[in-house]
Amino acid sequence: MSMYTAIATSAGRDARAISSDGKLDVKLALQKELGGDGLGTNPEQLFAGGYAACFAASLQFVAASKKVDVSDAAVTAEVGLSSNGKGGFQLDATLRVELPDDIAPELAQELVEAAHAVCPYSNATRGNIPVKLVVE
């Protein structure tokens, strides 16, 4: 049983995406790079924002269990869209994790890998799309 279920509706890349509670209501637009006008956000940007937020929360969760302060950490998600070579499309992701300077590189890598193991987005994409972890 789900702890929470988000519900959103859209008619496509040149439409709106609206959540059932009305808190999300965004204009979507096909990217200029794909032949659109680019005058709205796109699904890849929404995915990147969600993944960055979710991974940052997962990082805070695992760091707290080790009593490490990562309150100044930030996660930047880069989500790419490309052809899958079979007539469809695929995503790839790079997560750039900025941690406080006083965290040793070995501990930083351990925290990022632990966050990747518990993050719902990472678990949903594991084995489906390539995800590169970069500790900065």
Image: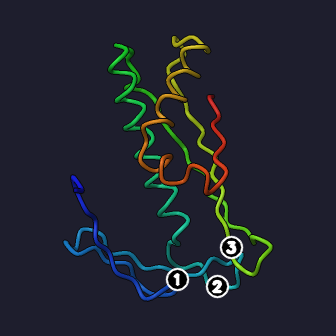
Q: Quadrant of residue 50?
A: bottom left
> Going by the image, does 93 lie left or right of 4?
right
Q: Give the mark nearest the N terminus, 3 or 2.
A: 2
Mark 1 or 3: the one toward you: 3
Q: Residues within 10 Å of mark 2 (few under 14, many from 20)?
A: few
Tell me the amino acid under the disc marked 3: Phe
Q: Which residue is mark 2?
A: 36
Image location of residue 5, percent across then percent down: 25, 62
Tag 1 secondary structure: loop
Circle 1 packing at 10 Å, graded few (<14), some (14-19), many (20+), is some
Query: Which comes sooner in the sequence, label 1 or label 3?
Result: 1
Question: Is 85 drawn above or below residue 13 in the view shown?
Answer: above
Q: Identify the secondary structure beneath mark 2.
A: loop
Where is residue 4? Give x, y as percent: 22, 57
| Whole-number angstrom distance, CA of label 1 to CA of label 3 | 14 Å
Q: Which residue is mark 3?
A: 89
Q: Which mark is residue 13?
A: 1
Q: Horizontal placement of 20 versus 83: left or right?
A: left
Give the vertical position of 43 relative to 97 (above or below).
below
